[in-house]
Amino acid sequence: METLNAVIERNEEGFYAYVEQIDGCVAGGSSYSEVKKNLEEMINLFIEEDPTLNKKYKNGYKLKFEVSLDSVFELLPEINISQLAKLGKLNPGLLRQYVSGSKKASEKQAQRVMEALGKLANKLNSISLTT
């Protein structure tokens, strides 16, 4: 079984992903889960329609996701990494390595960071300012 490396990044519009081994195989989505689902659908379409890929992946494939957390934090420089780590019960030093790009987060760790960002968003949405 072959392994496909998929990279997920974030921009202003949402998430996008691509497969390193299949040129042009890209997908987008408004959430981490959605882009993963959409990318898997695209991979299957590419394999189904390309005889070379169909032969290469006839025994199936394993999908390995890499998440570029540094792209998320480039878009949100206002976030205090230490406080986010505390909110998400994450190791602050490790989170800084993910943010700087010096270390890649596993899919599980990336999901934990996204959950912490979700908690932060909920906190922000729960307040209103008075004038």
Image (cartoon, grey):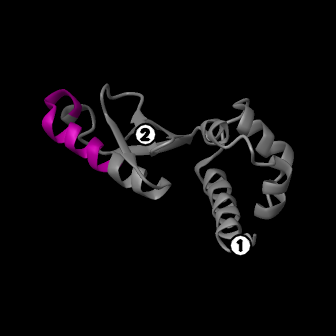
Q: Is residue 46 magenta?
A: yes
Q: Tell me residue 40's x, y (percent).
A: 33, 48
Prevailing SS of the magenta stretch: helix
Front one among 28 and 109: 28
Q: Can you give x and y, in whole percent of width and height, for residue 103 in the image?
A: 71, 34
Say which element carries label 1.
Answer: loop
- Position of the N terminus by quadrant: top left
Outermost residue on the front side: it is 131
Whether 67 is among the magenta residues is: no
Depth check: give the residue in front, 66 or 2.
66
Disc ID at residue 17 = 2
Amino acid type of the residue that numbered disc 2 sits on in the rendered structure: Ala
Location of residue 98 (image quadrant): top right
In the displayed structure image, the side of residue 48 where residue 11 appears, left or right: right
Q: Which residues are magenta?
A: 40-53
First along the sequence among labels 1 and 2: 2
Residue 54 position by quadrant: top left
Q: Is residue 13 above or below residue 109?
A: above
Side of 38 relative to 100 (left or right): left
The alpha-carbon separation of the residues under discs 1 and 2 comes to 33 Å
Residue at left 63%, top 63%? 118
Q: Which mark is residue 11?
A: none
Which amino acid is tagged 1?
Ile
Residue 92 left/right relative to 58 = right
Tag 1–tag 2 contact (CB < 8 Å): no
Nearest to the observer: residue 98 or residue 129: 129
Q: Which residue is mark 1?
A: 127
Callout 2 crowding tier (Cα within 10 Å): few <14, some 14–19, many ≥20: many
Residue at 59% in and 38% down: 68
Mark 1 or 2: the one toward you:
1
* Displayed quadrant of residue 73: top right
